[in-house]
Image: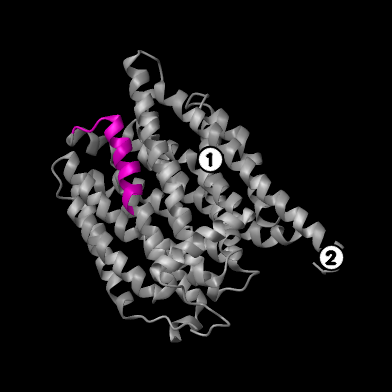
Amino acid sequence: MFWKKSPCAVLATLMVIHLLAQVDRNILLGFAPQITGELAINNAQYGFLVGAVWVLSYGVMAVFLGALADRHSRPRVIGAGMLVWSACTIASGYVQNFEQMVAARFLVATGEAALVPAATALLMELFSEKRRGTAMGLFYLGIPLGIGCSFLLAGTLGAAHGWRTTFHVLGIAGVVIGLPLILMGDKRSHSTTVQERGAPLKAQLAAVLAEMRDNRVVRYTVAGFVLAHLVYPGISFAQLWIARERGMDPATIAMTMGVMQIVFGSLGALAGGVLSDRLAPRFKGGHASVLALLMLLCAPFMIVYRLVPTDSPLFYVGMAVGIFMLMSLYGSATTAIQGAVPVRMRSTVMGFSMLLLNLFSVAVGTFVVGWISDALTTSGVASPLTHVLLVSDILALVLGGAFFYMAARIQRESARSLPAMGIKV
């Protein structure tokens, strides 16, 4: 197709779409105090809303829409999803209670599930192996920019016009951008030698499960990527934690976190992508070695962040490093996962990764953090969120880093065995 002749333009378009998707997804975090207060939502319900509600839709639909994107036009799949999530973002601005917000956010997640599996597979096709990590890092700039903008919007547009109007404006913008994508085709080879198109749904899912079972590098890399996201509850509860247990003003927190996400999240996405392209070829463990190294270097600062007061420079350094660390994983992890599987199942494998990530780290992790913090509060424990979020961060760093290390070790062993077999590497 003509649009494939301009990979950089495609990347720029996907970056804008991803930015808007992340704003729509995370705008709830920026308005956490206002929405929980107006709709009378407690910590456990809030954790369920930003966690389990999302994964029940996003995680499951990412697999099916990923399989659809492997078989049909990826831009059209993205466009259709964009129209769904934007319309439901508009609807979110009209809800009157917890149950209605659950229904609206469930459908927002359904639409957004189409984006990452289709977009990352498309970028893998358009960019050479030496540039894929950087391309992925640029695409994933949408996450920190989206999170940052959601907090900034909450502190500016939201402060002036309220959270409901902000939801309406975002939804309308998405509808306008999504409509042209419905008209775009995606011509790929149907030949048996290239096999760029995925199989029908049942056969495609069976093939992906077999690949995950037999390919240890992919399995361990996916596991590390999923478990590293146990730091996500710290993002979901950031406003509540800092306001309630550190005594800062919610509007100030929103602006501070918005700027931090934009600056250090963007640096993380860019640095992670560039480092994966530069360092992975030099390490026998490939991308997995880069991932393990990044987590090891960032761990001490992230732990100190939970323990020091807000007037300590280490508080803001730790916050910045935590934001940087999570985003630095995306470019390298996505490139590693999709580069190790057949072309015809890249979107589906990424969708499956999103399912696991949202199920274990976002849904279960966020709900458990909210539930335990409520129980500790009832028991009279001081600073309950501090204790729970510290444990969550430590688990993410230890378990995620361990699986990345195992994936790197397998790749190193494979690299050593190839020359012994007379194969040049």
Assess disc 2: are there few (<14), some (14-19) or many (≥20) residues with their C-alpha within 10 Å of its C-alpha: few
Examine the image and state in which quarter residue 60 appears: bottom left
The picture places residue 236, in percent across and down from the top left corner, at 38, 39
- Can you tell which of label 1 and label 2 is closer to the viewer? 2
Q: Where residue 400 sits in the image (x, y, percent)?
A: 58, 42
Q: Is residue 267 magenta?
A: no
Q: Which mark is residue 322?
A: 1
The disc at residue 232 is none
Residue 157 vs 178, above or below: the answer is: above
Give the residues drawn in magenta, as a range.
40-57
Q: Give the x, y percent position of residue 319.
A: 51, 37
Tell me which amino acid carries mark 2: Met
SS assignment for the magenta stretch, majority: helix
Q: Is residue 151 shown left or right of residue 15?
A: left
x, y percentage for residue 193? 58, 83
For badge 1, the amino acid type reads: Gly
Per the image, the residue denoted by label 2 is: 421
**Foreground of the two, 187 or 259:** 187
Q: Give the quarter of the figure containing the N terminus.
A: bottom left
Assess whether residue 52 is covered by the magenta stretch: yes
Q: What element does badge 1 sit on?
A: helix
Q: Is residue 163 left or right of residue 138?
A: left
| CA distance separating discs 1 and 2 | 43 Å
